[in-house]
Image (cartoon, helix red, strand yellow):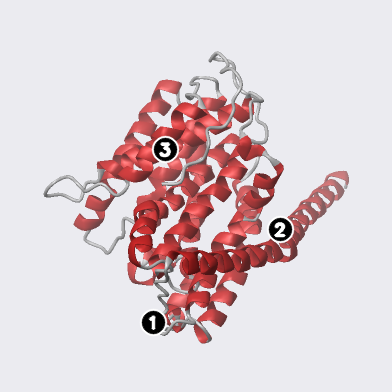
């Protein structure tokens, strides 16, 4: 398995009860790119770019790459809680999240429709209802529709639910003591392990993989750990100590369930280890001991990771469509060249989408919100003066 060299970190600060001032967490931006690479590797495996022994080795390394989505969910909760502003209204928070993800989501759906109509007919969505559900980011609530529209955007359905829930989660969590917050983390990890069993026993169709409610505990772990670190109640271990735990957690995501049940303790270990990694990187940044993930290249790649995630599977499948069954299964040298071609196309497309759609659309939508707020304030001032 390919591993990253342990980052150089300064001497670990002593934990104290003093709150940590909120600041940018560049290592987490870099981690987003590393996470996207795990998912990219997993989808190369799923489409079978590599054949023979090389395919077996690739599968051994990247079968668990789907847990990159888990890491995204934890990151999302952690970053939102770290930057939480008590004075911000729920409506303002939701609009900021909408401006962040929705324009690019629509572009991703459009590209998926083009791919389905041309090179990748197997991803075509049957029926207007599941496609409309994907456009509205609710298709994940129906297990059979989970990959409607843009197949990669099922995780955005979960994120949309997390964003909707965040204002209602953060306020009570902030008021809890550090001990109670620790209990919340433990309870959330238990729910992660129980999620497959809950889905199996549910009287209504649920998927432990894609039903947003069953993925919510991963987000809650991120939120709550951020609050613990930020208040100074807990000092995470050094990054170099946590990295091996993250690798173990990655591997244990493929561990079997408990005999005779669908309970999956390995998933809880995965979430716990990934959450420790996120918290350790954030703590290093907060104490000005940033890791290699904070370097400029990682920052630039991290900023385009959302666009890359939305298009990478479409590109992987489109490139492999040149083979009759869409599964190249090539010798390793040719497979590497093909994978690099898919990577280059996806990265170039991601940069274009980031620069021409994601950033300008987000700025425009936020400007509209500010203009509405200013007009409302001006009208209120005129009314008060009368």
Q: Residues within 10 Å of mark 2 (few under 14, many from 20)?
A: many
Tell me how far mark 3 sits from mark 1, CA to CA. Answer: 36 Å
Q: Is residue 192 above or below residue 15?
A: below
Q: Residues within 10 Å of mark 3 (few under 14, many from 20)?
A: many
Task: Determine which of the numbered discs, if any, sits on residue 325 in the image.
Answer: 1
Which is more N-terminal, label 1 or label 3? 3
Whole-percent x, y for residue 227 in the image = 52, 30
Residue 158 quadrant = bottom left
Which is more N-terminal, label 2 or label 1? 1
Horizontal side of 91 relative to 123 (left or right) equals: right
Task: Determine which of the numbered discs, if any, sits on residue 150 in the image.
Answer: none
Horizontal side of 55 relative to 359 (left or right) equals: left
Q: Are marks 1 and 2 in contact (CB under 8 Å)?
A: no
Q: Are marks 3 and 2 in contact (CB under 8 Å)?
A: no
Taking depth in this image into account, of 163 and 65 the one nearest to the observer is 65
Residue 95 quadrant = bottom right
| Residue lying at 44% horizontally and 73% vertically, measured from the top left | 148
Whole-percent x, y for residue 350 in the image = 64, 63
Residue 209 quadrant = bottom left
Taking depth in this image into account, of 167 and 312 the one nearest to the observer is 312
């Amino acid at each position: 398995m390919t591993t990253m060299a342990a980052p150089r970190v300064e001497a670990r600060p002593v934990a104290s009860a003093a709150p940590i001032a909120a600041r940018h967490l560049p290592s987490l931006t870099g981690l987003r790119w590393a996470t996207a690479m795990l998912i990219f590797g997993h989808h190369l495996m799923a489409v079978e770019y590599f054949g023979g022994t090389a395919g077996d080795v690739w599968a051994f390394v990247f079968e668990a790459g789907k847990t990159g989505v888990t890491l995204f969910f934890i990151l999302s909760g952690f970053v939102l809680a770290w930057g939480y502003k008590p004075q911000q209204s729920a409506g303002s928070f939701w609009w900021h999240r909408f401006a962040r993800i929705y324009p690019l989501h629509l572009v991703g759906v459009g590209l998926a429709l083009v791919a389905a109509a041309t090179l990748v007919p197997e991803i075509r969505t049957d029926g207007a209802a599941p496609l409309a559900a994907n456009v509205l980011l609710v298709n994940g609530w129906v297990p059979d529709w989970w990959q409607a529209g843009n197949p990669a955007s099922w995780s955005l359905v979960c994120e949309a639910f997390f964003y909707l829930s965040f204002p209602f989660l953060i306020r009570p969590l902030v008021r809890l003591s550090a001990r109670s917050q620790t209990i919340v983390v433990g309870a959330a990890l238990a729910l992660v392990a129980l999620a497959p069993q809950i889905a199996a026993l549910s009287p209504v169709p649920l998927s432990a993989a894609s039903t947003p409610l069953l993925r919510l505990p991963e987000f809650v772990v991120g939120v709550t750990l951020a609050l613990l670190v930020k208040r100074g109640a807990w000092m995470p271990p050094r990054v170099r100590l946590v990295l091996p735990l993250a690798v173990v957690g990655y591997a244990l995501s493929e561990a079997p369930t408990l005999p005779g049940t669908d309970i999956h303790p390995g998933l809880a270990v995965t979430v716990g280890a990934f959450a420790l990694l996120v918290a350790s990187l954030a703590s290093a940044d907060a104490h000005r001991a940033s890791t290699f993930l904070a370097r400029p290249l990682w920052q630039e790649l991290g900023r385009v990771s959302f666009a890359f995630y939305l298009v990478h599977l479409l590109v992987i499948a489109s490139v492999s469509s040149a083979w009759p069954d869409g599964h190249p299964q090539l010798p390793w040298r040719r497979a590497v060249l093909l994978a690099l071609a898919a990577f280059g196309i996806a990265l170039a497309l991601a940069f274009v989408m980031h620069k021409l759609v994601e950033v300008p659309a987000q700025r425009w939508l936020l400007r509209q919100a500010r203009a509405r707020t200013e007009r409302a304030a001006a009208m209120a001032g005129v009314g008060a003066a009368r």
